[in-house]
Image: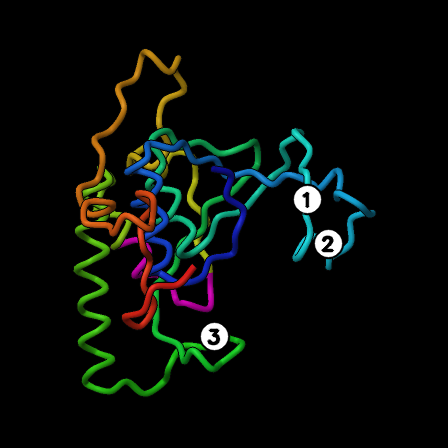
Amino acid sequence: MYLNSPGGSLDGGLALGRALRHYRLDARVVRLEPSLCIGSTCTESDQRHGVVVYGRTPHAGMCNSACVYSFLGGAQRSLAATSSLGIHRFYLASASDPKRQPLTRLSKADTARLDRSVKDLAYYLVEMGISSELLSMASAVDPSRIRYLTSEDMAALGITTPVTAPDDQPLPRRTSRIGATLPPATNGWPIVEREGRPFD
C-alpha cells in the first residue's frame, strides 16, 4: 500500500491500519505520478472518475496526522527517499466544516469522546508494536502545526522496519479486531463505520 496523504479521520486511519495488519500488507510512504488515463489524457476529472495508471518512479511523499496511524499497520514499513511522516495532536471538528477547524467549545460528550480516542489510540499503538511515546510526542504538537519525525525518531519508536529479505523477518501477528465477525456479503473485508453506519 502506497501512502501519500495530509491526513484525515483518526477513526478511519486506525481502521485502515488494522486492515493493513490483518491482511499483512506492507506500507510505504511514496508518491507516484499518473502516467496514463484510459481513454483520454490525464485531467483532474479523469483522476477522480476514470481509470488512472501510475508510473513506477517513486517521488517523495508525505504521510501526516491520521495517515501516520494507517502507516503503522503495515507488516513492513518504509519511506521513499526524502518522504516524511508528520504528527500532531488529534482534535474534534464539525463534519459540516469544510476547513475542518478544531472545535473551540467542547460538550461533555465531546470530552468523553476525546478521552475514548486517547485510550483507543494507546491500545492501537500497543497492538501494532509501536512505542506509546509516539502518543506523547503527538500530544505536544498543536493541531495547526506538524512535527516531522526524523529517521532516528522512527527507529527509536519502532515505526520503520529493518530492510531485510522477506523470509528473514517474520510477519507480525494479525490483529484480532478486524474481519472476525463480518457478514458473508463483505467477502472478508472489514466494515468501517462512521457515526454508527457502514460506509465505503
Distance in Å between CA atoms under marks 3 and 2? 26 Å
Residue 25, x across and y down, in percent = 38, 33
Counting other residues with Cα less than 10 Å from the Cα at mark 1, is it few (<14), some (14-19), or many (20 or more)?
many
**Image point 46% across, 68% down: which residue?**
144
As drawn, the residue found furthest toward the front would be 185
**Image point 37% across, 54% down: which residue?**
13
Counting other residues with Cα less than 10 Å from the Cα at mark 2, is it few (<14), some (14-19), or many (20 or more)?
some
**Cβ atoms under marks 2 and 1 closer than 8 Å:** yes
Q: Amino acid at mark 2?
A: Asp
Distance in Å between CA atoms under marks 1 and 3? 28 Å
**Is 189 or 52 nearer to us in this picture?**
189
Marks 1, 3: nearer the viewer: 1
Q: Amino acid at mark 1?
A: Val
Residue 115, x across and y down, in percent = 18, 69
Q: Which residue is mark 2?
A: 46
Q: Amino acid at mark 3?
A: Arg
Q: Which residue is mark 1?
A: 52
Asked if residue 70 lies left or right of residue 55, the reply is: left
Q: Which residue is mark 3?
A: 100
What range of the chain is rendered magenta?
Answer: 136-145
**Is 40 or 140 nearer to us in this picture?**
40
Total tally of numbered discs in the picture: 3
